[in-house]
Image (spheres, rainbow, N blue to C red):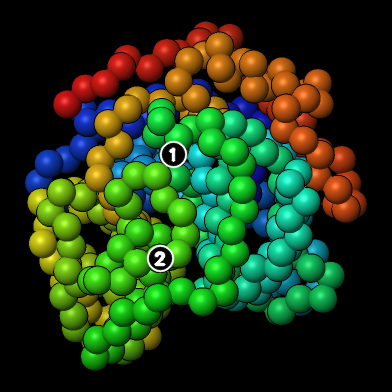
Amino acid sequence: MSNLDRQPTLSVCGGRGFVVAEPVRELLSPRKVKLGESSEVRRLLPNLGRRMVGAWAFVDHYGPDDIADEPGMQVAPHPHMGLQTVSWLHEGEVLHRDSLGSLQTVRPRELGLMTSGRAISHSEETPKSHSRFLHGAQLWVALPAAHRHVEPHFQHHAELPRVTAPGVDATLILGELDGATSPGSTYTPIVGADLALAAGAEARLPLNPDFEYAVLAMSGEAHVDEVPLLPGSMLYLGCGRTELPLRATSDAAVMLLGGEPFEEEILMWWNFIGRTNEEIQQARSDWMTGSRFGEVKGYDGAPIPAPELPAVPLKPRGRVR
């Protein structure tokens, strides 16, 4: 999915200086952003004061939207570098095309994982024949320096590991959780899981104290460490936790996102993650001149042009602890 903001800010993200080394309860409110002609998303990351959670660098929550008589998601071809995109649905379908020739419909609780590496372009659209509702999340994972130039590739996993307990059914998206391991490729210690909670359920989820965590509320009413979460909000939890108390007052769904704090500081602008302002400038130039990112074939529409770069360049300040 693209960041369709026509005036995206150049953000310095990552670095241990932004990590909270103890358990906290920091409620993040979303920013509403237009996605194409007919959709709106709630952006949770990057957020004012909270840029990343582990390697998770971008989180959008959308829907549930009634698209019975609407085109739904229509995101024309656009580029990515230095990151992975994670498509996650609760309702609806998204058709993925990319410059490698991939063509895949992603359905609820199936993993669509695209590793951009050095360069890729893709489009995402609701198929012409589609379900009434569209509801899901789109997330980016920053690639560390050692792997940010890997060959681009796309993975689709219709079957994912599940971890269950009374009143809780967890689908593991990425990483490891309670002994289960996702088949999705990862390049940093990370976890992503979708938790379906039955009304009245109370549980304690095992966590890694070396990870920082956040919980995104998808639907229903859930209490996370006694903090009530409404759909479309996210609670940052910091580090140092060995378990997480969960309680549902209705049927609810939340996403657990976590990982080892991302040590490198990075630059994120539009759909690119790099390390220097020059890298970002080159990526924009390459996209606008039709080189490096390839061509998405079969999409009915023109590629998305890159916005103008800000006048004042920013540079990451290096690693901090």
- Image check: 69 left or right of 229? right
Residue 204's place in the image compared with 46, above or below, is below
Q: What is the quadrant of the C terminus in the image?
A: top left
Q: Nearer the viewer, mark 1 or mark 2?
A: 2
Q: Which of the pair 5/85 is nearer the observer? A: 85
Cβ atoms under marks 1 and 2 closer than 8 Å? no
Q: Is residue 199 left or right of residue 45?
A: left
Mark 1–mark 2 distance (CA, rounded to whole Å)? 18 Å
User: Of the residues shown, which amino acid type is indicated by label 1?
Assistant: Ala
Determine which residue is flagged by label 1. Answer: 142
Looking at the image, the residue that sits furthest to the top is 312
Camera-nearest residue between 72 and 143? 143
Pinpoint residue 305: horizontal percent, then vertical percent.
77, 30
Q: Secondary structure at mark 2?
A: loop
SS for callout 1: strand
Which residue lies under the disc numbered 2? Answer: 182
Q: Quadrant of residue 247?
A: bottom left
Q: Is residue 5 above or below residue 194?
A: above
**Residue at image point 81% right, 26% down:** 290
Q: Residue 43 vs residue 193: left or right?
A: right
The image quarter containing residue 221 is bottom left
Residue 198 in sight here = yes
- Looking at the image, residue 229 sits to the left or right of residue 78; the answer is left
- Name the residue rendered at 52%, 45% in the picture: 84
> Residue sitting at 23 percent across and 71 percent down?
178
Relative to the observer, which residue lies in front, 284 or 184? 184
Q: Which numbered disc covers residue 103? A: none
Q: Position of residue 246 (x, y in %)?
A: 21, 74
Tally the numbered discs.
Answer: 2
The location of residue 45, given as percent across then percent down, is 42, 44
